[in-house]
Structure formats: structure tokens, C-alpha cells
Amino acid sequence: QRTSQPRARDRETIRAPLSIPARALGMSSSSAAASVPGATPADALRRNRIISSKLYFDVPGSKAPVVYSTAYDIAFLGIEKMHPFDSSKWGRICRFLTKEGHLEKTRVVEPLEASKEDLLVVHTEAYLNSLRSSFRVAAIVEVPPLTLMPNWLVQQRLLYPFRKQVGGSILSAKLALERGWAINVGGGFHHCSAEEGGGFCAYADISLSIQFAFVRLDISRVMIIDLDAHQGNGHEKDFANDGRVYILDMYNAGIYPFDHAAKRYIDQKVELVVSWILQAVDHIFLHLIQI
């Protein structure tokens, strides 16, 4: 079922701010933030955080535009296998590509971990503070036993890998503009929005990558093409009122997250209907692969 309808927002009233790096203008971060016409204090603070971030760095030409770190892979005493999402697939992908001769290990780009200041570009302080609760994180990644784990361990074994992947997504946008293409082997946490995580997505790396690109890469328009089986409700909510972002989302309408409110913000919606039998077979197959 293919549908298209106007998003619930007025595109004509939205204007993209000028996106020129401070260093290109010979300005300090604070003065660059304040120079954007009509910028609110919150806008200025966000811009300042982006300009001050270390997540963008120069990548040597000898490196391939493929971003990955061994820190991406999540191993948590086997508890991670209680969720159908394969939390070690990233390493297997890179090992396969290396084994088949498609990628040299030494040419892979290692990203930096997204800091709290980086995450605050999109996330609220309240949301980030909520991740100090193991109960809250367990609900987001849908693995109940995590509730019983000390939060320092949850931070180290689960949230740190996620933050590394966020750094990879943000850097990949820069590499894509420079090289014509780039891949972050991890990331794509499309269920997480600024104020709410879910569906094994704790940080909104898609929204963060786009906000960084607006400021640091002189980008004025972005198109999100989301082809995951699930609706990408996180980025849809984050860009609900931003006419610079066009969203195409193709997903199975009969499975999680059933976020009807977020659907209003999809520019091009392609809803697929898959039978419950195929869904069950797919779930069993994923489980057997992990075993």
C-alpha cells in the first residue's frame, strides 16, 4: 500500500539557517553561533556545541570511507541474546568483507565516542539523565534482566558501544560529502528521538548526523530513506516541523512501533503488509542464527 500525503506542518514558514563553519569565517564559536539571524539562545547553544565537537576529524586518503570499531559489538554475559536484534552483526560484517577481499582491515576508519555535549545537540538533559537508570535502559533495549545490573556496567557494556556508533554515523556524513559515499557499519537507531528511546535504540544518531551536517557541512536539505522493516518513528518526530528534511519510509505496517502520531510526519509513506506467518518464521530464523 503506497500512500503520500502532506505532512502535518507548514513547509512555507520554515527557513534553513546559514550553515558556514566558524573557522571558515575566522570567527570564534560563540560569535558564529550568535551571528545566525533569528537564532534563539537554544539554537545558539546547539550550534556552539556542534562547532566545538571533535567528532568531525580529517580522515587520510589512504582510508576507505567505511567507519567501524570493534567497540560496536555488544557482549553482555549473553543477556543480549534475549533480544532478537543481533548485537554482534557489525563485527561479522567487517570480518566477512575482509575475508572476501572487499575491505582491508587497516583502511577502516575508527570513530570517536559521542560525548555528552555532542548528544545534547539533540537530546534533552532529562533524557540523558534517565539513562543512568538501568531500569530505563532495560525498557529501551527490551531486555528486562538489565534492570538488575549496576548502571556503571550497563554504561560500559551497552551504552558505550551505542555512543561509538553515534560518533560513526556523524563522521560518515562528513566522509560521504568528501568522498561521494560512506558507510557506518553500525548506527541507524531510527526509533530514538530527542526525548524518548525504544526498540533497541538509545541515541538518535540519525537526527544528530543531520543537525551536524546543517551546521558544519553547509547542507540546506536532507532526505532520509528508511528501508528498515520497522517504521522510523524517532527521526520522524524529531523533524516533524523541519521543512529541510524530507522523509521516505518503507516499512511493515503490521509490526512495532505502531506510532500513528509519527506517521503524520512522513513525506512519502510506503506501508507493506506481511502475514503473521512470515513474521514468525523471520523471528525464529533470527533466533537460530544467534544460537
Image (spheres, rainbow, N blue to C red):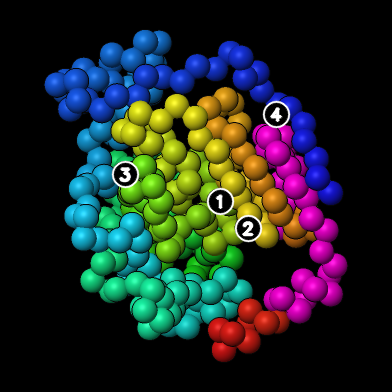
Mark before the other along the chain sequence, 2 or 1? 1
What residue would you read off at disc 3? 178
Q: Of discs 2 and 1, which sits in the foreground?
A: 2
Disc assigned to residue 7: 4
State the separation of the CA atoms marked 4 and 3. 32 Å
What residue would you read off at disc 1? 190
Tell me which amino acid carries mark 2.
Asp
* Residue 181, above or below 209: below
Mark 1 neighbour density, 10 Å: few (under 14) some (14–19) many (20 or more): many
State the separation of the CA atoms marked 1 and 4. 19 Å
**Magenta part of the protein: which range?**
256-283
Label 4, secondary structure: give it. Answer: loop
**Which of the image's four quarters has the C terminus?**
bottom right
Left or right: residue 213 compared with residue 200: left
Mark before the other along the chain sequence, 3 or 1? 3
Tell me which amino acid carries mark 4.
Arg
Mark 4 neighbour density, 10 Å: few (under 14) some (14–19) many (20 or more): some
